Each structure stands twice: as structure tokens, then as C-alpha cells.
Image: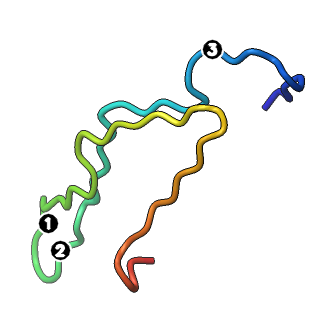
Amino acid sequence: MPSRTKGANVSGPLLAVRDLRKEYRLRSEGLGRSNAVLVALDGVSFRVEEGETYALVGESGSG
């Protein structure tokens, strides 16, 4: 990633995510194949501007 010159103007966000979706295919236990899908994220959007700090916190034991 290129370094920035101190005091340089940055136009736009440092990071922009729009309509993020993440799915996991579940393994089948037993005979046959399973087509089951677990949707972990659906339609998540966010922007991180210069100087902002974010934290993602889950339930206890969420990994």
C-alpha cells in the first residue's frame, strides 16, 4: 500500500463496503449431499473515513 504524505488531502473514504454478503455451505452429516447454506451477513454496508476508529464486538465465544 503506498504511503501518504503528511497533510495530504484524501478524497473519499479510506474503506467503503456496500451490500456485503457472506455465506457458508454446511456439511452434510450422513448420506447424500446437503445444499444447506448459512447466511452470516446480508446487505451490510459501511464507510471508514480518515481518523475514524471502529470495533466489531460479538457475543462471548463468538471467536
CB contact under 8 Å: marks 3 and 1: no
Q: Is residue 26 left or right of residue 55?
A: left
How packed mark 3 is, by other alpha carbons closer than 10 Å (few <14, some 14-19, many 20 or more), is: few
Q: Residue furthest right?
A: 5
Q: Residue 6 appears at what percent x and percent y? A: 88, 26
Q: In the drawing, what numbered circle is on residue 28?
A: 2
Q: Is residue 61 left or right of residue 24?
A: right
User: Which one is closest to the eye, mark 3 or mark 2?
Assistant: 3
Q: Please tell me which residue is depicted at 63% across the width and 14% down the height of the picture.
A: 11
First reached walking from the N terminus: tag 1 or tag 2: 2
**Quarter of the figure that contains the N terminus:** top right
Quadrant of the image occupied by residue 52: top right
Amino acid type at circle 1 is Arg
Label 2 SS:
loop
In the rendered image, the vertical position of residue 43 relative to residue 9, given as above or below? below
Q: Which of 45 and 8 lies nearest the eye of the viewer?
A: 8
Q: In the drawing, what numbered circle is on residue 11?
A: 3
Q: Residue 8 appears at what percent x and percent y? A: 81, 18
Amino acid type at circle 2 is Ser
Give the residue at mark 1.
33
In the rendered image, the vertical position of residue 4 relative to residue 44, given as above or below? above
**Quarter of the figure that contains the C terminus:** bottom left
Label 1 SS:
loop
Label 3 SS:
loop
Colour theme: rainbow
Quadrant of the image occupied by residue 30: bottom left
